[in-house]
Amino acid sequence: MTEEKIIEDLQKAVLEYDSAGAVSAAKAAIAEKMDPLKAIEKGLVPSIETIGQKFEKMEIYLPELMLAADAMKSALALLLPLIPKGSKGAKATVVIGTVQGDVHEIGKNIVSSMMMAGGYNVIDLGVDVKTMAFIEEAKRNGAKIIGASALMSSTIGSQKDIVDFLVSSGIRKKFVVLVGGGPTTKEWAKEIGADGCGMTAVEAVRLANKFSKGR
Amino acid sequence: MVQILDVMQKALEGKPMSETDYQLRSFAPKVAEKVREHRIKYDPQNPIPSDNSQADELFEAGLELLLDVGAYCTDTGRVISYTENEIKRALKEAPAKLHFGEGRDRKHLVARKIEDKTPPWCLLGAGGGPCSSDRSFLTLVEGYAEIPETNAITTPAITRVGGMRVRPASPLEVLAAQRNAVLAREACNRVGRQGIPIMNSLATAESDIALAAALHPKFGMRQSDGYMICCMDPMKVDFARLNKVAVVLSMGGAIGMCFGPMLGGYAGGPEGTAVSNVAHHMMGILTYQSSWLLPFTIHLRYVASSSRDMLWVISSMGQAISRNTHLLSLNLNYTTAGPCTPMCLYETSASVTAAVVSGLSIESLGVATNKHEDRTTPVEPRISAEVGHAVAGMKRSDANELVKKLLTKYEPKLAEPPMGKGLYECWDPETRKPSKDYQVVIKKYKREMAGLGLELKPEMH
């Protein structure tokens, strides 16, 4: 199979929300000893960017965005381990989740998918994530950015806990903390010492770009 | 009749499925299928449609959606399926009338029909919006209780206890929920409406333990209040929510499931969101044992319910439910703009009109997307209620023309709405009146509304 065909298949799989197709194309790339970085950059990234733009314009909706991100994740799971350490790859690793005591996931899912579309390696911890889990997972995965979502005015206090814990542990400078969700505001982010508040998924990605090399 | 133990049995024995598969590979494609099969079509030219046959198709689509995909329990990872017989029986046995409140404030919430002259039930207040202090909480709730049209109060949420931010499922949340109950009752007492029901009980209690803890009689909650339990989108439930159901049922309280399928979320565009809303009504009376319902769909981009497509969703869903059931359903609306702006008042007027002429009652409202502390006043719910009363009995076609004119006033500004002013900048807690600036805005707004053909009550100050 030619590289052009593999790239085309990878692109198509993401655009058609086809996880099985993405896995099959990634396997073909490996079998043909294709540069995995090229497969990602030429195959997966342009399509997920297109998906992100379509979602922004509301030409597609949340399920399509998440299914496309799933397809991309399936291919990345095979391709990323083959990239030698130190090579140019994902922009940075982002650990993201909804804070402790909060099970709302839609906003977090949108940001998670849009981050992936923006070229980030996203570790999605799900909902009701304990403060310590954000930090432990960020350390374990070498993440530079922690994204904490909260939908309720009674749960945004947990965003403060993440920042406070990093400060108390003397490791605040190692991580960028971005907050978002229903009741969060830029003023709130400033008050708790977070690095930014993404009022929309697009803004969250923009903030991540700003901080992708660290604080 | 499906009861709480039946729900638990289904949650424990239903078809195993991952949450991702349920929402992305079962719910979402099935919504799209129902939209196609029933030829549901959003018409931007008619945000309040007058098509009875489409309303009936929408109802069938919602019923089939629930039948096909069921609800989902995130704690057991299983689908909670219902038979057609169970759904139809639950619809038949759901109450068409409930009473809330005590003494002279004890009123009946009744089912409404399309173009019904019966005024909507007005659940007025902040819709759980955040407030900064006990003082703000009391100021707002006193103001809500003084609105003549208020049938019930929807309180703000307390965000701090002893100077500390509330943490979920912690003693801080327990104490905040208890204070929520005490202060809400105290505020109503202060203005002589001791019997008025609190129907978003309890806004500050997100966790099951906080709700249960605040129900001790000494905090003032009553059986005749309304107990709101929020559904996880789409059509999901967990043990914490079912715990709340069991607790409220045990005290004989009336549960109102609130649900907010986002336009642009799992159900897709306006058509799918309308189908999802209809299905949620039926899912609510079964899974959440709800005797009244509280849809609050919002737009993914604007986080509000006043855009053209949102008005269509509210109206279409309301018509489908009120033509085909006697469910007690109250639509909660959010604006993008803040207090002391004409845009905020136009936005809420449009959303309330869409709901009321389509057979719904109202919960009004979340101001400025309901996220900013103290960025709401008693004026916005008062105006919403006045509009709700004024449009009761209006023909859908006339309402359609009205909201189209309203849309011209704010539609282009939805992406960057004016935030207006904070509570104390435009509301005087001592005189319990809006500021002079705000009075000017309100009077101008009422003149404009009269010009559009809707005479509202004259301002008294």
Image: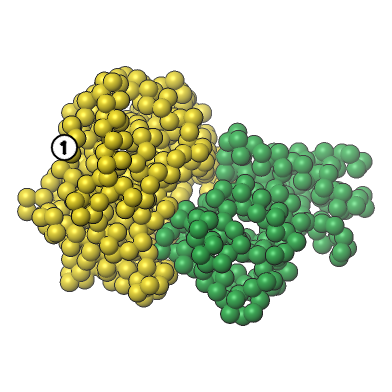
Compared to residue A62, the image places residue B193 above or below, namely below
Rendered residue at 35%/74% (across/down): B162
Residue B446, relative to residue B439: is it above or below?
above
Q: Give the image location of residue B71, x and y in percent.
A: 43, 50
Q: Can you give x and y, in whole percent of width and height, for residue B32 in the image?
A: 52, 35
- Outermost residue toward the left in this view: B103
Q: Secondary structure at mark 1?
A: loop
Dot 1 alpha-carbon crowd within 10 angstroms: few under 14, some 14 to 19, many 20 or more: few
The chain that appears green in the image is: A
Farthest residue to the front: give it.
B436
Is residue B460 left or right of B395 when viewed as pictured? left
Q: Chain B is which colour?
A: yellow
Q: Residue at x 42, y 53 (%)?
A: B372
Any part of residue A103 in sight: yes
Question: Tag 1, which chain?
Answer: B
Q: Which residue is denoted by mark 1 in the rendering?
A: B460
Amino acid at pointer 1: Met
